[in-house]
Image: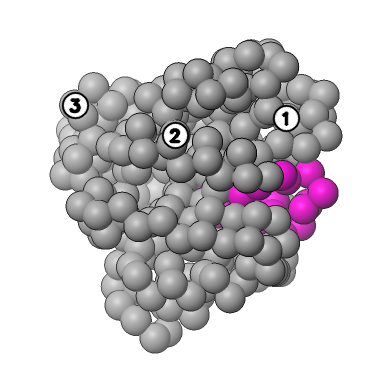
Amino acid sequence: MDSFRRDGLTFDVVDGGPQDGEPVILLHGFPQDATAWKHVSPALHQAGLRTLAPDQRGYSPMARPRGRRHYTLRETTADVMALLDAAGLKTAHVVGHDWGANVAWALGAWHPDRVRTLTAISVPHPAAMAKAMVISDQALRSAYVGLFQLPLLPERLLLSGGGNPLRRMLRSGGLSKEAATHYVGRMREPGALSAALGWYRALPWGGRDPVGTVRVPTLHIWSTGDAFLGRTCTEATRQYVDAPYRLEVLDDVTHWVPELAPDRVAELVTAHVRTA
């Protein structure tokens, strides 16, 4: 499959690997798209796994509704459920990075009957994140989130000079020139950055639907070089999983784990899937 529909929106999907392999849903973060997984997927395919990597809500050109209410976790998790239904899958392994990890946590808590295993890369359980904002330096690490919630200003700042500020942000974290240029190009599409920022702007609505305890086998991958997410929220995550849980720490890797450590991610995901 190369797309699916939900509520009048069309989502692009990269579907690869053996069609009869165990399905793995790959969920990207900001400001990425399905290409974030292009160096991870081949190893998963070689392991006999099928991967489905959607361009999520706000990133698929035909799925960019206006208004922050369209970007809550209830909506983004429902998108993944629609993907599963469109692919004819009762269950799947779910892997998410950055915002994709937030969706993965919510799926594991709200729809454990559809999730065989969960792998969250970089981002901790939302409750652990909230706790760390009070007791650690996480509020300082997350200060950019408040900026991203402002109207208009972040679009002007990030896309000024042809997107150079956004490009510098990505490159400073170790992303290749090719990857940074690709993501900046996608965010310069009409309405794309505003739609992607909708995920941040919807955060004030998130408290209405708290993510509870996750009851599926969970792998959490965190990197010591992540400037946005600290050790406190990472280590606090364990208490919100009532199932087999493993924390894997990658040394000297920045936030962009799928792009910078794809072989290790593929190795860890493959091993995790095989334990299910």
| Residue 209: in magenta span | no
Camera-nearest label, 1 or 2: 2
Q: In which quarter of the image is residue 230?
A: bottom left
Q: Residue at x 52, y 36 (%)?
A: 270
Residue 67: horizontal and vertical position, in percent? 61, 46
Q: Residues within 10 Å of mark 1 (few under 14, many from 20)?
A: many
Q: Give the range drawn in magenta.
A: 99-118
Identify residue type, mark 3: Lys
Q: Name the side, left or right, on which 43 lies relative to 180.
A: right
In which quadrant of the rendered image does the C terminus lie?
A: top right
Q: Name the side, left or right, on which 165 lies relative to 231.
A: left
Q: Residue at x 30, y 77 (%)?
A: 137
- State the separation of the CA atoms marked 1 and 3: 31 Å
Q: Which residue is drawn at 42% across and 28% down?
A: 40
Q: Residues within 10 Å of mark 2 (few under 14, many from 20)?
A: many
Q: Quadrant of residue 243?
A: bottom right
Identify residue type, mark 2: Ala
Q: Badge 1 is on which residue?
A: 83
Q: Kindly give the residue lying farthest to the bottom in the view shown.
A: 135
In which quadrant of the rendered image does the N terminus lie?
A: top right
Q: How crowded is mark 3: few (under 14 residues within 10 Å), some or many (20 or more)?
A: few
Q: Badge 3 is on which residue?
A: 177
Dot 2 falls on a residue whose secondary structure is: helix
Residue placed most toward the observer, 195 or 233: 233
Q: How many marks?
A: 3
Q: Badge 2 is on which residue?
A: 266
Residue 244 can be seen, yes or no: yes
| Vertical placement of residue 132 versus 86, above or below | below
Identify residue type, mark 1: Leu
Residue 240: horizontal and vertical position, in percent? 61, 71
